[in-house]
Image: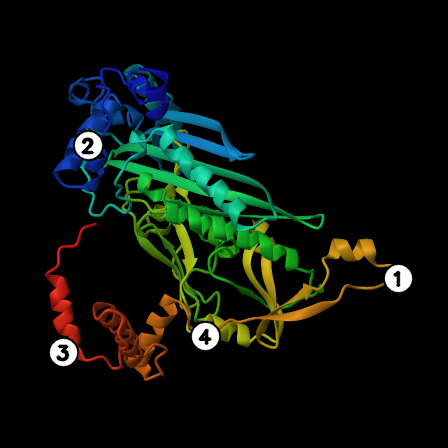
């Protein structure tokens, strides 16, 4: 294998040779889609990780080494095989100048016996090493229960939440580089104040094979891709920076010129607005969190406090709040592993539980924590599909997938209108939360002042650095003027027109673009065509429909050469 193909495949073939007695084939991507192909993919995955049919027949293995893991009398055991390869390319100073590839390959075995947990892992899949890992975990978590041979049954994939068109294994470095270059060039073209751009693109593919002592077995193909850029601008000696990024469970089809345009504009706009910002007066005031970027506060300050291990151990402030009202009745918080292509979605979690949607807070009442197998057993309920591992080297613990707040009964503009004086925040940064105390701290990266129910910011007549350099008096401040940010403006874009069309049907509001206006526009267009067909004659509106039809049919018979 040459260097190019080795990098392109993430060294797949080389690592495949570590699987004792296995073929070099990796499960097909289509095999993750369910049906007959899924069985073929599972078989290939078993061979890839050295647990093929011949191995299963060997008496010293007894069903995927699971009996070895339970030989000391554990209650439960599982095996987690992982082969992940990651590629990262970076752009700085106008050119792609960094490329890295990382490969992870190995197996972890977990044994549960009462409150005891034994865990061991190996960074290969040779038979002896896997058996030693299983027996190590068994010695840590021992009991009196006796197990016979384990019969494994394939777990059917009901729905694939991240189907892909083109897998990253088929994509070379030269296929990815142009998108970073386009992103760089687009950002520079949008604003002359741009002084530096740093962009990166990363993609990873994980092949996961899981089985447990309950007879569950599954294979999952997990893609992940990120594209983002940091934009740095300079204006009159002042420097500002911001960023834009997207991350999804998608294949190469994720990269597109449209995505480049969106990220470039977003990075430039997020940076440019900072030159107009001023520091608000200190003090306590209401905060309105915008959708999107501000969601990090929900994740860090609240989401982690709903993870069951913190509550089982009485660390979280919500440990004694289950089935109690914890917030306004209009608030519902969800943790969801079923959003198509979302980076937190899972077909199966790392314990073999199907991806699902879980209400943590329903109409203000704390209805559920996020559970893995251990915490679910403690609370006497079913796992919620939140058993997550960092890698095969780590035991699963209950962690978030995609945590968000449902829309309430108020529109954004109505919430803003209810605030006399406060802050509207659309981006937070440098945050941290204390789960036990319920305290959290975040810096506002981007926000607007709310006064009298309206978004406002103060724009400097002269940039601050220039004012400080030229002001000759004692104490002073630069001239500013008040700018109001519309939160409910006139609909002018296509989405606005469509929304207006729906409201006209539902509520009878005045249409922005009524059908009569469209007919008038069509009359003008038809008049232009008819005039040209008649050698430039003047045309009266409305046009003669019979004459127009006659000339149109004549031209339809003509041969057109492109």
The answer to whether marks 2 and 1 mark residues whose Cβ atoms lie closer than 8 Å is no
Q: Which is nearer the eye, 477 or 119?
A: 477
Q: Which residue lies under the disc numbered 3?
A: 546
* Residue in front for this viewpoint, 285 or 489: 489
Q: Total number of numbered labels?
A: 4
If you read the primary sequence from the N terminus, does the residue marked by circle 2 or circle 4 appear first? 2
Q: Nearer the viewer, mark 3 or mark 4?
A: 3
C-alpha distance separating marks 4 and 1: 44 Å
| First along the sequence among labels 2 and 1 | 2
From the image, state whether disc 1 or disc 3 is nearer to you: 3
- The image quarter containing residue 144 is top left
Mark 2 vs mark 1: give the one in front.
Answer: 1
Residue 259 image point, x, y percent: 40, 48
Q: In the image, residue 441 lies at what x, y percent?
A: 61, 53
Q: In which image quadrant can residue 369 be found?
A: bottom left
Q: CA distance from mark 2 to mark 4?
A: 53 Å
Q: Quick check: can you spot residue 465?
A: yes
> CA gap, disc 2 to disc 3?
64 Å
Residue occupied by mark 2: 41
| Horizontal arrangement in the rendering, residue 420 relative to residue 333 (left or right) | right
Q: Considering the numbered disc 1 on the image, is that residue within a helix, a strand or a loop?
A: loop
Q: CA distance from mark 2 to mark 1?
A: 77 Å
Residue 122's disc number: none
Estimate the spatial distance between the alpha carbons at disc 1 and disc 3, rounded to whole Å: 79 Å
Along the line of sight, which residue is nearer the eye, 290 or 186?
Answer: 186
Q: Earlier in the sequence, mark 3 or mark 4?
A: 4
């Amino acid at each position: 294998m040459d260097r190019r193909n080795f990098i392109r495949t993430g060294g797949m073939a080389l690592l495949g040779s570590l699987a004792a007695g296995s073929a070099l084939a990796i499960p097909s991507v289509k095999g993750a889609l369910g049906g007959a192909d899924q069985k073929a993919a599972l078989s290939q995955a078993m061979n890839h990780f050295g647990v093929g049919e011949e191995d299963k027949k060997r008496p010293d293995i007894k069903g995927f080494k699971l009996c070895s893991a339970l030989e000391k009398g554990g209650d439960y055991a599982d095996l987690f095989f992982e082969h992940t390869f990651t590629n990262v390319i970076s752009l700085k100073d106008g050119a792609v100048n960094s490329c890295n590839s990382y490969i992870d390959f190995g197996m972890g075995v977990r044994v549960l016996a009462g409150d005891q947990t034994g865990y061991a892992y190996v960074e290969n899949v040779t038979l002896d090493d896997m058996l030693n890992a299983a027996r190590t975990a068994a010695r840590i978590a021992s009991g009196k229960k006796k197990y016979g041979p384990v019969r494994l049954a394939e777990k059917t994939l009901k729905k694939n939440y991240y189907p892909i068109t083109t897998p990253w294994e088929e994509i070379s470095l030269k296929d990815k580089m142009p998108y970073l270059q386009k992103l760089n060039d687009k950002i520079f073209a949008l604003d002359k104040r741009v002084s530096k751009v740093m962009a990166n693109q990363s993609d990873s593919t994980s092949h996961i094979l899981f089985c447990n002592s309950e007879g569950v077995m599954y294979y999952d193909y997990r893609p992940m891709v990120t594209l983002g850029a940091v934009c740095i601008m300079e204006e009159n000696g002042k420097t500002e920076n911001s960023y834009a990024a997207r991350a999804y469970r998608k294949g190469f089809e994720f990269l597109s010129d449209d995505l480049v345009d969106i990220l470039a504009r977003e990075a430039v706009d997020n940076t440019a607005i900072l030159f107009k910002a001023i520091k608000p007066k200190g003090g306590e005031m209401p905060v309105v969190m915008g959708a999107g970027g501000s969601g990090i506060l929900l994740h860090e300050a609240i989401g982690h406090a709903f993870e069951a291990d913190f509550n089982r151990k009485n660390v979280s402030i919500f440990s004694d709040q289950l089935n109690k009202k914890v917030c306004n009745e209009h608030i519902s918080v969800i943790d969801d592993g079923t959003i198509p292509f979302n980076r937190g979605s899972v077909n199966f979690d790392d314990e073999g539980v199907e991806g699902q949607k879980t209400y943590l807070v329903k109409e203000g009442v704390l209805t559920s924590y996020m559970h893995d197998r251990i915490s679910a057993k403690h609370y006497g309920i079913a796992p919620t599909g939140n058993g997550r591992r960092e890698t095969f080297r780590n035991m699963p613990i209950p962690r978030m997938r995609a945590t968000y707040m449902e829309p309430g009964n108020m529109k954004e503009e109505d919430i803003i209108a209810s605030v006399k004086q406060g802050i509207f925040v659309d981006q937070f940064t440098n945050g941290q939360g204390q789960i036990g105390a319920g305290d959290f701290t975040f810096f506002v990266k981007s926000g607007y002042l709310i006064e009298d129910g309206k978004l406002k910011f103060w724009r400097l007549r002269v940039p601050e650095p220039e004012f400080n350099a030229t002001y000759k008096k004692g104490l002073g401040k630069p001239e500013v003027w008040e700018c109001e940010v519309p939160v409910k403006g006139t609909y002018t874009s296509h989405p606005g027109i469509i929304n207006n069309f729906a409201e006209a049907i539902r509520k009878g509001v005045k249409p922005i673009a009524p059908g009569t206006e469209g007919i008038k526009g069509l009359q003008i267009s038809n008049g232009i065509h008819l005039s040209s067909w008649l050698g430039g004659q003047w045309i009266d509106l409305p046009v003669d429909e019979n004459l127009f039809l006659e000339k149109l049919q004549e031209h339809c018979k003509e041969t057109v050469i492109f």
